[in-house]
Amino acid sequence: MNTRISSPWKNAGVRWFHFWLPMLALLLGGTARGAPQDIDMNCVAAPTPHPFNARVGTLFDQPIGTQNNPGAKVFWEFVTNPVGCGATPPFNCNGVQIALPAGAPDSSVPNTEKVQVHGTPTAPGTFAFRLVATLDSGGGTSCERDYTLDIKPLLSITPAGAIVFGKSPGDHKKVIAITNNDTIAIGEIDFTITCTNPLCYFNIADKLVNLGPGTSQDREVTFQGPLWMTDYLATLVVTVPNSSYRFEIALQGNKGKPVITRQPDQLELSSPHNLQGSVVLGNQESEKLTGIGIRIADCVGGDSCPFSVTPNALELEPKGDVSQQDSKAVSVELVENTCGTANLEVTVPGSASSVAAVRLKGLSEGAKVCSQDRKSVRECRNGQWQTTQRCARDFCFGGECICTQDGTACATITARSVCSNGTRVEEKCSANQLCANNVCQTLPEPPVLHPRFFWR
């Protein structure tokens, strides 16, 4: 009769024991492996440096210990130091501190004490270093290992530089790519636009949710300002809640000014028959320009500006408009008997400066007027009134000194000052006369001396 004997390993309880026995022996024997960055005290060579992948603004904490040395004390020391992190340990690598256990390298420490790689990175960077661990017993076995601390931004954003929106409507949208450099998903990324003007013409979705590790998503930034917007700046700020991550991108709306032509580029006005002129403005853009402003600026010529312009605002149809409304004239007027210079400036909404200018000149050089007290003559020179003649006891009329009576003082020693038809002129005295108190007086006859006078 055949008897079949069951193997004890077929028993369920025995099979469980058979499975865990090797694991128990491994743990008790000290051959269990620790963290991947630990140094194996069996000196098993690592093929490449161990990478520490840290992210700017995110706390990093991965200490370095030893494996396969149960109960032994260890000496720790740097073989090569991380460059750019200080001269002596502990090293600070852009916010991440690499520190030996307390007492090292001069004393051995328990194998539970580890090299700390800890901190919140403040800036990107790559740092390489090498450590050596030496057992304080059993022949003093020493094992080395290389490490690389690679600090990257939590996010990579492309483009990273300033974003400029062009003049054409088709150039009013830009796309930025956001990449998660971390090994875990980022739950939320926030976007904020800070504008320099009260009206903000830039737009973007305010947040991105659940960006997976190593993945990218696009976000569209739009600009909806007027076509001629110039020198309009804003800042796009990207942040991650519960972290110190912050990234800024400069935005510039519609770089460039609209093309508005003007004819002429210089306008001269003068009294009495040329006190008014016109300037024709033309639109060279393919879209309608509205809200165009016309103003007088940089005026020189007395307490009040002698120039005025109408209208002060207009709009121009696109270039080539069949109704010929792509160009319009504005009227410039000069106040009579004034002297001055100014600029006629053409502006558009949102522009920090004029987009076209015409030089204005009032009265030709050399024009003359009377002062308010009529005691002097003022002449237009370089756009300003300058006193060029004093009328003394006479008075000024029509830009000239006018007299009503003869003067009380001589014009010269041999001429009187007389008023002839309102004009002061010189009247010569006779050959034997001199002028005194504006009167020509005959010189007395010289005395006749007797010849005997000379023989005495």
Image (tube, helix red, strand yellow):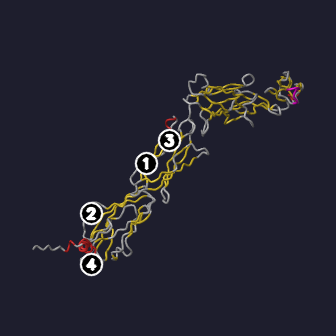
Task: Note whether 429 is above or below 122 in the view shown.
Answer: above
Q: Earlier in the sequence, mark 2 or mark 1?
A: 2
Where are the magenta residues, as a range?
A: 403-408
Q: Which residue is mark 4?
A: 137
Question: Closest to the observer: 99 or 55?
Answer: 55
Question: Closest to the observer: 354 or 57?
Answer: 57
Q: CA distance from mark 2 to mark 3?
A: 48 Å
The residue type indicated by label 3 comes to Val
Residue neighbourhood size for the residue with mark 2, other residues' Cα within 10 Å, grouped as few (<14), some (14–19), many (≥20):
few
Residue neighbourhood size for the residue with mark 1, other residues' Cα within 10 Å, grouped as few (<14), some (14–19), many (≥20):
few
Q: CA distance from mark 2 to mark 1?
A: 36 Å
View extreme (front): residue: 1
Asked if the residue under mark 3 is in contact with the one under mark 1, i.e. CB atoms within 8 Å, the reply is no
Give the number of the mark in front: 2 or 4.
2
The residue type indicated by label 1 comes to Gln
Residue neighbourhood size for the residue with mark 4, other residues' Cα within 10 Å, grouped as few (<14), some (14–19), many (≥20):
few
Q: Quadrant of residue 66?
A: bottom left
Q: Earlier in the sequence, mark 1 or mark 3?
A: 3
Q: Earlier in the sequence, mark 4 or mark 1?
A: 4
The residue type indicated by label 2 comes to Ala
Residue found 19% across the figure and 74% down from its top: 8
Q: Quadrant of residue 88?
A: bottom left
Q: Which residue is mark 1?
A: 217
Task: Note whether 209 is above or below 86 in the view shown.
Answer: above
Give the number of the mark in front: 4 or 1.
1
> Which label was assigned to residue 164?
3
Q: Which residue is mark 2?
A: 46
Q: Earlier in the sequence, mark 3 or mark 4?
A: 4
What is the magenta segment's predominant secondary structure? Answer: loop
Q: Is residue 255 left or right of residue 10?
A: right
The residue type indicated by label 4 comes to Ser
